Image (cartoon, grey):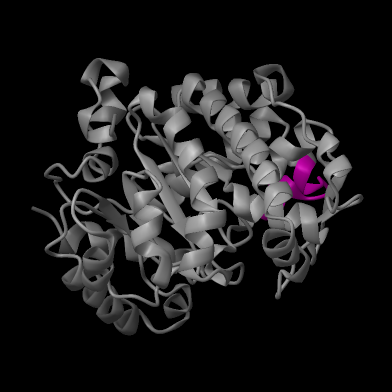
């Protein structure tokens, strides 16, 4: 079942009728909807204030704090959707993987997965493991009203890369060595992560998320033939697992221009596009039957307002013929971005595309 085929009764009527969800379903919209990846985060002074002294993973496990942080960009920017504040390694931490998010570094895994025996670290995720997620989404949906909430998770390949490398990497040599050298172990690792990721998304949907996004942040490091053989099956398993809920499923990666047809093939209803490929060309690569999301270069926001608007018009013009378009950046909001530039951008897109 695609989101376009979902019975209306499956979702609350107010978010269901939002511009964001209509665009995801490729239906007519009153204006092009806007939200930003990392819209809740370090670019907001109010975020830095409430997070002061609280480690990242701990902040993801406090429902009232998660609620406040998730709502901050909705209040400030008037975006068309909220995205649940969390981190892609939260489900791994929840099942007992020994990891931490170190400031200035990112997720660091104490015991990287390098052998079949190491897979024992990865047990199934249960709703009880992440009860704070259910509580936070309950609080959020009551506060958000008609504004949709996007749930999210890290894709199996990106999670596997962190687990095998032991932390962030520029070359992914250990992960790729396993993928090429022990394809059976690699397939088992990704399959296990697909199950954990699907369970994490199911918790969010059942708690009230109106859409979900799968972030495959590192997939751009792969050639299409390797993606198809070694990654696509696990991502498809995640999308298949949540298909019955009828909520839109978004798939996003960075540097994935060559992978766009395959990312659409994996089962998403909406394919995210980074800034390197124009939206009309992205639509040609993905093919019909999918909405697209993107794709202003995040660094454009550091330019004068006139330049931001000019580049935004280029994105909107390239997306003018799409079946469905959700405006976003081509990656996350950079920490030093002026929040007012984001607020102005939302207003400009809404005004410029008003039907």
In the image, what residue occupies the spot 25% across and 51% down? 291
The image quarter in which residue 337 lies: bottom right
Depth check: give the residue in front, 69 or 247: 247
Q: What is the chief secondary structure element of the magenta stretch?
A: helix
Looking at the picture, does residue 150 appear above or below residue 253?
above
Q: Nearer the viewer, residue 62 or 327?
A: 327
Q: Is residue 282 above or below residue 232?
A: below
Can you see residue 43? yes
Quarter of the N terminus within the rendering: top left
Residue 226, image x, y percentages = 54, 64
Residue at the spot x=26%, y=69% of the render? 279
x and y, in percent, of residue 75 in the image:
44, 44
How many discs mark residues in the rendered view? 0
Q: Image check: 32 left or right of 263?
A: left
Percent of width and height locating residue 102: 84, 58
**Residue at the spot 57% in from the left edge and 48% down from the top edge:** 155
Task: Kindly give the residue lying farthest to the left in the view shown.
Answer: 355
Question: Where, by quadrant of the figure, is residue 353 drawn?
Answer: bottom left
**Residue lying farthest to the right in this orientation:** 110
Can see residue 329? no
Residue in the foreground of this view, choosing between 241 and 344: 241
- The image shows residue 45, relative to residue 94, as above or below, that is below
Q: Quadrant of residue 58?
A: top right
Q: Where does the magenta region start and end? A: 48-57
Would you say 150 lies left or right of 220 here?
Answer: left
Residue 69 among those drawn in magenta: no
Residue, x 54% and y 39% (percent of image)?
84
Residue 144 spot, x, y in % from top left: 42, 30
């Amino acid at each position: 079942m695609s989101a376009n085929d979902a019975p209306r009764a499956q979702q609350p009527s107010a978010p269901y009728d939002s511009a964001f969800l209509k665009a995801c379903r490729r239906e007519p919209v009153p204006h092009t909807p806007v939200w930003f990846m990392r819209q809740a985060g370090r670019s907001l002074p109010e975020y830095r204030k409430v997070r002061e002294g609280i480690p990242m993973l701990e902040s993801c496990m406090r429902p009232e704090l998660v609620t406040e942080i998730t709502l901050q960009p909705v209040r400030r920017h008037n975006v068309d959707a909220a995205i649940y504040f969390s981190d892609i390694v939260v489900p791994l931490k929840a099942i007992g993987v020994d990891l931490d998010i170190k400031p200035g570094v990112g997720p660091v895994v104490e015991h990287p997965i390098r052998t079949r025996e190491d897979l024992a670290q990865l047990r199934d995720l249960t709703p009880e493991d992440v009860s704070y997620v259910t509580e936070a989404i309950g609080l959020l949906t009551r506060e958000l009203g008609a504004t949709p909430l996007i749930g999210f998770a890290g894709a199996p390949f990106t999670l596997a890369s962190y687990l095998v490398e032991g932390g962030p990497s520029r070359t992914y040599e250990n992960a790729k060595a396993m993928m090429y050298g022990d394809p059976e172990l690699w397939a088992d690792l990704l399959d296990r992560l697909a199950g954990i990721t699907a369970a994490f998304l199911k918790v969010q949907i059942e708690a009230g998320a109106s859409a979900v996004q799968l972030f495959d942040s590192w997939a751009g490091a792969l050639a299409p033939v390797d993606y198809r053989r070694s990654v696509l099956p696990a991502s498809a398993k995640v999308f298949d697992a949540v298909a019955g809920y009828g909520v839109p499923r978004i798939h996003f990666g960075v540097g994935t221009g060559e992978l766009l047809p395959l990312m659409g093939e994996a089962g998403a209803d909406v394919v995210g596009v980074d800034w390197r490929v124009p939206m009309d060309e992205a639509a040609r690569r993905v093919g019909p039957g999918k909405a697209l999301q993107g794709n202003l270069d995040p660094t454009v926001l550091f330019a004068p307002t006139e330049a931001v608007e000019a580049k935004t018009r280029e994105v909107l013009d390239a997306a003018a013929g799409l079946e469905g378009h959700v405006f976003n950046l081509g990656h996350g909001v950079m920490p030093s971005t002026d929040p007012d530039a984001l607020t102005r951008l939302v207003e400009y897109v809404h005004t410029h595309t008003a039907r």
